[in-house]
């Protein structure tokens, strides 16, 4: 493994830790309804920070966009919109399933699709047959690790409900199905980045470094994601008459703003890591990013007492799943470097 690749892996570790914990502040915005939190989070993470970061890093940013054809701009925009729908489902799933289980299902599906689709659509010629076998093995181990983690979460949830009532937990299957749909849509943000590289190429032509040029993709992709997120938040704010909460507890703006900083910071670092990881950066890098997100989210769940009182078999499944994810990390990291 070269120093450049090692730096890329290191960046994905930090990015995964930030993204895996970005929803944690949501637990502390107690005086706001979820739609208040999501509205501010969306504005900060999908509008303010992406554009501010791009203007700060990419020279002649507006000239980059003016030089591009409409279809080159629409590709990341539309993929971003699909991912925006996943974000709405993500918030619902996390509230219904908890951070550990919700992340495992959503990020699990997103990791598999987000790793394999860019690989087979545009990067297959950059990897040897032996390297491809390692990647596929890493994906299989990753799926097993995620499945064990989710299974442990389900055992934990069943035990919790049994303590409260003799009736089976209702709504769990529906919650899992919502999380799976979210997982199918979630990697569309990676598709926006992987298949929107025309923006980065144009930015590089205007003298930007490859790392800086990569940032040109995010404002367009995340603008697509902003539309469904803001639209849904406004709908809920209007339906639930939640607008007044912004004035009654203005200090709560800190928590969703922090969520936005952590989230956008994570994706900014992921964009850098994809450059350092080379031709397969948007496939291998995405898989590693998702693995580290799951690990970080699980640790957050443990530290915030989400797993307190869980049965021993649930903890065993969780630990085994984490070991599987570590194995997948090694397979993906050393797949042919």
Image: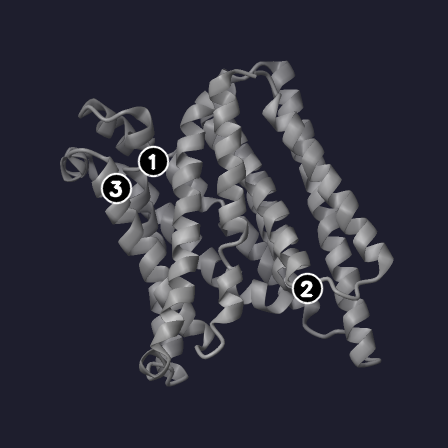
Q: Looking at the image, which residue is at 76% across and 54% down?
A: 151
Q: Are marks 3 and 1 in contact (CB under 8 Å)?
A: no
Q: Secondary structure at mark 2?
A: loop
Q: State left or right for residue 208 relative to residue 318.
A: left
Give the spatial CA distance, label 3 vs label 1.
15 Å
Q: Nearer the viewer, mark 1 or mark 2?
A: 2
Q: In x, y percent, where is residue 125?
A: 49, 17
Q: Quadrant of the C terminus?
A: top right
Q: Which residue is mark 3?
A: 54
Q: Residues within 10 Å of mark 2 (few under 14, many from 20)?
A: some
Q: Inspect this view and state whether residue 105 appears.
A: no
Q: Vertically, is 154 above or below 240?
A: above
Above/below status of 237 relative to 310: below
Measure how far apart labels 2 and 3 are at the Cα level.
37 Å
Q: Is residue 96 above or below residue 4?
A: below
Q: Position of residue 256 (x, y in %)?
A: 41, 64
Residue 275, x across and y down, in percent: 40, 27
**Sequence order check: which comes first, mark 2 or mark 3?**
3
325 to the left or right of 87: right
Mark 3, residues whose alpha carbon is within 10 Å: few (<14), some, or many (≥20)?
A: many
Residue in the picture at 79% in, 63% down: 310
**Mark 1: few/some/many CA within 10 Å (<14, 14-19, 20+):** many
What residue is disc 2 on? 306
**Picture quadrant where residue 304 is located:** bottom right
Residue at left offset 33%, top offset 78%: 246
Which residue is the site of mark 1? 196
Front position in the image: 69 or 7: 7
């Amino acid at each position: 493994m070269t120093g450049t690749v090692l730096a890329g892996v290191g960046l994905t570790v930090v990015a995964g830790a930030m993204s895996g914990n970005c929803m944690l502040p949501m637990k502390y915005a107690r005086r706001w309804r979820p739609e208040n939190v999501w509205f501010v989070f969306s504005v900060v993470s999908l509008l303010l920070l992406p554009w501010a970061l791009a203007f700060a890093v990419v020279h002649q940013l507006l000239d980059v966009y003016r030089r591009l054809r409409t279809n080159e701009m629409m590709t990341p925009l539309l993929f971003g919109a699909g991912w925006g729908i996943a974000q709405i489902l993500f918030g619902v799933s996390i509230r219904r399933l908890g951070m550990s289980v919700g992340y495992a299902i959503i990020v699990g599906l997103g990791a598999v699709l987000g790793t394999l689709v860019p690989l087979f659509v545009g990067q297959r010629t950059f990897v040897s047959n032996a390297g491809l076998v390692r990647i596929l093995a890493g994906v299989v181990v990753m799926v097993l690790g995620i499945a064990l983690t989710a299974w442990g979460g389900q055992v934990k949830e069943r035990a919790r409900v049994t303590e409260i009532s003799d009736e089976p937990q209702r709504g769990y299957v529906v919650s899992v199905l919502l999380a799976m749909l979210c997982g199918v849509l979630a990697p569309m943000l990676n598709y926006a980045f992987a298949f929107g590289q025309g923006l980065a190429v144009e930015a590089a032509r205007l003298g930007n470094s490859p790392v800086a040029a990569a940032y040109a993709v995010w404002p367009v992709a995340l603008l697509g994601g902003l539309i469904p997120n803001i639209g849904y938040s406004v709908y809920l704010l209007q339906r639930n008459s939640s607008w007044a909460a912004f004035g009654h507890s203005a200090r709560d703006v800190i928590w969703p703003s922090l969520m936005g900083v952590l989230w956008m910071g994570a994706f900014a670092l992921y964009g850098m890591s994809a450059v350092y990881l080379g031709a397969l950066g948007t496939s291998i890098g995405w898989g590693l990013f998702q693995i580290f997100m799951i690990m970080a989210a699980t640790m957050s769940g443990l530290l915030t007492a989400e797993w307190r009182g869980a049965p021993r078999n649930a903890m065993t499944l969780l630990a085994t799943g984490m070991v599987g994810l570590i194995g997948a990390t090694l397979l993906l990291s050393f797949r042919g470097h």
